Image (tube, grey):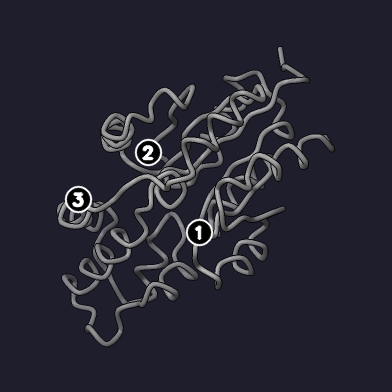
Amino acid sequence: MADRNGRGVFFDLDGVVLDSIGAIWRTTREVLFAVGVPEARLPDVECFLTTFAMPCASFYRAYGVTSSPAELDDLFFRIIPCYEEVVEPYWGIRPTVERLRTFGFRTAIVSSGRPERIEAKLSKFDLRGLFDAVYAGAAIKTESLRAASADFGLPPERACFVGDLSSDMRDARAAGILPIGFAADYPFMPPVLVTAGAVAWVHELEDLPSVITGLLSQC
């Protein structure tokens, strides 16, 4: 039975919980270079963030890459450990999630990442206890978001998803869940997120509780 009074907040891992965009961008550049894309065509961080979406096949095809998704994934996960040593959680994630939980929100990670990597990162930074569940491994997150909502007994309109990419906004809308964009310190991202369907966006995670409670109080 759906909990008509319940509320949920679902978070992407990379780019929202973890300040890992730099590592992912650099890894993607190396993948592109390794499969033959000239250095002069490699994307800067703005180009990467404004054009990348999951699943990533269309992003790679725009650079003329013909390798299979499995080959690209294997290459990506061989390279990224070189850059992940400097990855840390965003400073505001712990107080933000703790505050939302004191308000009675259910919380979950919904990510396209590999489950073992997600659990390793949450354990490394002692974040696992902040989240009631983890949904991982699906490039398109719509079904994972629906599953999280259903598992918590929440009507979709009583939940929101915080993501950092246009595809996150798309997938949340498709699931009937409110999309909220996290633009971090990238001033070029809010228009991208809004165009993709974000109902709100923030630069600071600490602003999320007031934004989310305001949105869900209208439901």
- The quadrant of the picture occupied by the N terminus is top right
Q: Do the residues labelled 3 and 2 touch (CB within 8 Å)?
A: no
| CA gap, disc 3 and disc 1 | 20 Å
Residue projecting furthest to the top: 1
Q: Mark 1 points at which residue?
A: 184
In the rendered view, tell whether residue 46 sits above or below residue 86.
Answer: below
Q: Position of residue 138 (x, y in %)?
A: 42, 41
Q: Please tell me in which quadrant of the rendered image residue 175 appears.
A: top right
Depth check: give the residue in front, 30 or 214.
214
Q: What residue type is labelled 2?
A: Gly
In the rendered view, tell whether residue 105 sits above or below residue 22.
Answer: above
- Which of the marked residues, 1 or 2, is nearer the chain's N terminus? 2
Q: What residue type is labelled 1?
A: Ala
Q: Position of residue 133 (x, y in %)?
A: 46, 24
Q: Mark 3 points at which residue?
A: 85
Q: Position of residue 203 (x, y in %)?
A: 57, 58
Residue projecting furthest to the right: 218
Q: How busy is the neighbourhood of tag 2: few (under 14 within 10 Å), some, or many (20 plus)? A: some
Mark 3 or 2, which is nearer the eye? 3
Q: Do the residues labelled 1 and 2 touch (CB within 8 Å)?
A: no
The residue shown at (59%, 42%) is 161
Q: How busy is the neighbourhood of tag 1: few (under 14 within 10 Å), some, or many (20 plus)? A: some
Q: Name the residue under label 2.
A: 137
Q: Which amino acid does label 3 sit on?
A: Glu
The residue shown at (25%, 51%) is 70
Is residue 138 rendered to the left or right of residue 125? right
The residue shown at (66%, 66%) is 195
